[in-house]
Amino acid sequence: MSRPSVFVTGAASGIGRATALQFARHGYRVGAFDVDASGLDSLAAAQSDIVTGILDVTDSGAWARALSEFCPDGRLDILVNNAGILSSGPFEDTPPERHRRIVDVNVTGTVLGCHSAFEYLRRTPGAQVVNLCSASAIYGQRDLATYSATKFAVRGLTEALELEWGRHDIRVFALWPVFVDTAMTQNMNAGAIRTLGIHLTADDVAAELYAATRPGRAWGRVHRAVGWQARVFAAAAQCSPARLNRLANQWVTRR
Ligand SMILES: NC(=O)c1ccc[n+]([C@@H]2O[C@H](COP(=O)([O-])OP(=O)(O)OC[C@H]3O[C@@H](n4cnc5c(N)ncnc54)[C@H](O)[C@@H]3O)[C@@H](O)[C@H]2O)c1
């Protein structure tokens, strides 16, 4: 029997790199794609059987080429839409082109990934899509406004496709980590990170992601909070009134 396959975007560093290594250790055929060539070289040096390639997730032609090269048999078991970017600080201090790029990579990149991989996933029994969402999709985050908005979009896309693609036997779900120790959180200028600190590593998230893709493990859960803080906030947001949610987020994200 051929090995199951997983295609990971943003795999040159952080959570994507840890995810690629996690699946490779478990015998998967791993495709690790990114715009960062030197990060991919370092990943390939760490695990030589990982297939690496350049992919800008905002480029639909590049998606088509990368998938057809990585999946010559037309099948794909797992797509991990992980590539993402962020800018922090006061909204008005970030140039408009950068706001646009955050939306392009985080939202358009995920939309194009799902769209481009659909035929490969549909042909593969029990295929799965994992979208990297974030605890920033629980309530809009001060200092991370556009990033937070993009994760609300990823949340909505995940919910919709989970409903739509059930008939194709494609499972879609999202992971919601709170702050993780990666390049993304280095020098982040946001009140929430000062209040909450960083208690997760990329390996923690990759292990949770791998475990969540095992058959029978709480299938049917569309959103999976990662880390105790994200679990507490997600649960509290479900049962507290809107005014209380706002007050809690005002306190957590205070400057
Ligand atoms: N770090 C956190 O605290 C945290 C928390 C919740 C969710 N997330 C999400 O996890 C995912 C991974 O983040 P990370 O913390 O590992 O960050 P990271 O900066 O370490 O890695 C992101 C990767 O995405 C790649 N990338 C950027 N633009 C790309 C593009 N156009 N096409 C392809 N690849 C591109 C980068 O080169 C980089 O390798 C992101 O979607 C992020 O939003 C991160």
Image (cartoon, rainbow, N blue to C red):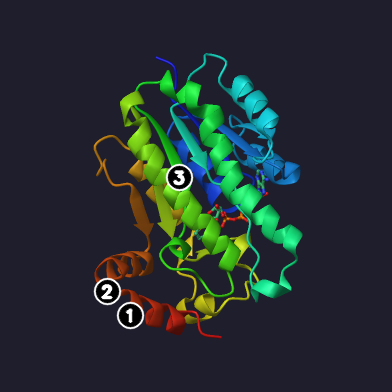
Labelled pair 1, 2 in contact (Cβ < 8 Å)? yes
Name the secondary structure under disc 1. Answer: helix
Which numbered dot is residue 244? Answer: 1
Name the secondary structure under disc 2. Answer: loop
* Horizontal side of residue 176 vs 240, given as left or right: right
Q: Which residue is mark 3?
A: 157
Question: Against 7, is 197 above or below?
Answer: below
Kindly identify the amino acid type of the residue bearing the numbered disc 1.
Leu
Name the secondary structure under disc 3. Answer: helix
Residue at x-position 57% and y-position 15%: 72
Sequence-first tag of 3 and 2? 3
Q: Which residue is mark 2?
A: 240
Q: Quadrant of the C terminus?
A: bottom right
Kindly identify the amino acid type of the residue bearing the numbered disc 3.
Leu
Kindly identify the amino acid type of the residue bearing the numbered disc 2.
Ser
Residue 224 in the image, given as x and y percentages of width and height: 35, 53
Q: Residues within 10 Å of mark 3 (few under 14, many from 20)?
A: some
